[in-house]
Image: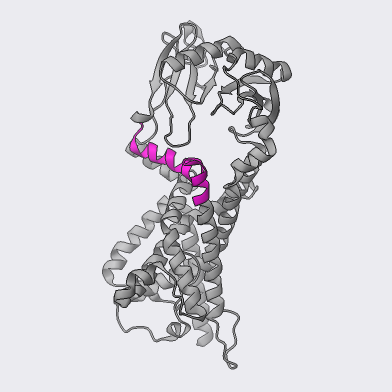
Amino acid sequence: MTSTTGTPPQRTADPEPAGRSWQGVRALLVRLHFYAGVFVAPFLLIAAVTGLLYTVAPQLDQVLYGDKLTVEQVGEQPRPLSEQIAAARGAHPEGALAEVVTPASAEDTTRVVLSLPELGEKQRTVFVDPYTAEVKGELTTWFGSTPVTTWLDDLHRNLHLGETGRLYSEIAASWMWVIVAGGLVLWIGRARGQRAKSARGVLLPDGTARGVRRTRSWHAATGVWLALGLFFLSATGLTWSHYAGERFGQVLDAAKGHAPELDTLLPGAEPPAEAGGDEHAGHGGHGAAEEAPQADPADFDKALATARQAGLGGTVTLTPPADTASAWVVAQSDNVWPVHYDRVAVDPAKGEVTSHTRWADYPVLAKLTKLGVQGHMGVLFGVLNQIVLALIAIGLILITFWGYRMWWQRRPTREDRSAALGKAPARGTWRLLPLPVLVLGIPAVAALGWALPLLGITLAVFLVVDVAVGVVRRNRTA
């Protein structure tokens, strides 16, 4: 839940309790929820709007590029990959052959991916009808994404501002769960006194209320329904953020939670020397392996046949070796549930698998991370996944609007007291906290600041500014 607390304006003017009590915890949550909502809600709003646009990316792909992504007529038997690759290279001889992606369904085209230095980390993907070997067209892609999907992805991740723009999305993901958790505690705690109506009071808005109370009930009840989805988006978004993602990687290292690595070194081959190693490492057969020549299209058919015999079904990505010491890599890329992510290293000269990693052998953390990313991107459960994400995005937009509306509705309206917005919760709530909460809370906040650096930095900035404002006000009063 975002934005304001929903606390009536007169409560902010009440005198502070004389001593520490558990009411101080609520007072602190009220203040945290209010200020986090006021300052972070714009980031959440941007993330919600851009995320909502991204949910329709698959449909936009079909509208804009359907003639390239799908075939006109499904045939009985696909042509060999070598013929399809030859057709693609005949139309586009430029660049190096980077990989080939087999069709995900009978209606899809084969993707022949070319690497060109002038495209940087992007590629040129040639789309070929697998039944006729006819080239349907080409697009500049980014890790398999079409231009419109890439544009929407950049908009959602960094607002097309590069690494600097990624700060907005990480701040939003870092604070989202704090705002949601605080709002849930405040709303559920408020409803407990209603006893018989507690469940209804928590889950449904109050249709009899008016003014700020009505807005608050819609804001809070909608937040309750969205809470699980917002927690999920916050957690999964942080796994591939810049700073928090680095911390998450360290946790995976410590817990040995990374996906198993595929050994691509051919049996009997010497491993390539690392860059910056012994300047004489090239002597005696221990130097870096020679760069592999351009892959023979016929080898794609051999690698695919070997991978199929090893049990890799569905759509697969075939990547030729980068050097003479490495094997081919064939990886399943079925991202829709039930997912398939088995990979094999193939020696096409001998027609045998030299290494195999199975999805079933992934550690639990690696599986959760992989599935979470696909769910966050709206891929894991197909159209249903897109619909759920769209509803969450629309709900987040609404509760953000209602939060700011509450702030406006709580403004003084008497003639002798005019203000544009409602009064903020009182300062100094930390002095009301029970000592056990302080003793446990300070190290917990420090740990969170390490795990989520942007959360820690922005919280520290707020505390410094808040203290400075308090000092200025006291001096003015004096």
* Nearer the observer, 200 or 398: 200
Asked whether residue 394 is in view, the answer is: yes
Q: Residue 371: name its quadrant.
A: top left
Q: Which is the main secondary structure of the residues drawn in magenta?
A: helix
Residue 220 appears at what percent x and percent y? 44, 68
Which picture quadrant has residue 8?
A: bottom left
Residue at image position (65%, 25%) is 127
State yes or no: residue 375 in magenta.
yes
Q: Tell me if residue 75 comes above or below residue 223 in the rendering.
A: above
User: Is residue 241 among what the camera can see?
Assistant: no
Rendered location of residue 466, percent (x, y): 49, 71
For the view shown, which residue lies furthest in the right direction?
91
Residue under the point 41% across and 44% down:
248
Seen in the image, is 73 located left or right of residue 354? right
Give whichever of 30, 401 is nearer the camera.
401
Q: Is residue 101 magenta?
A: no
Rendered residue at 49%/21% (across/down): 330
Between residues 58 and 344, which one lies in front from this camera angle?
58
- From which residue to which does the magenta span run? 362-388
Residue 279: x percent and y percent?
52, 16
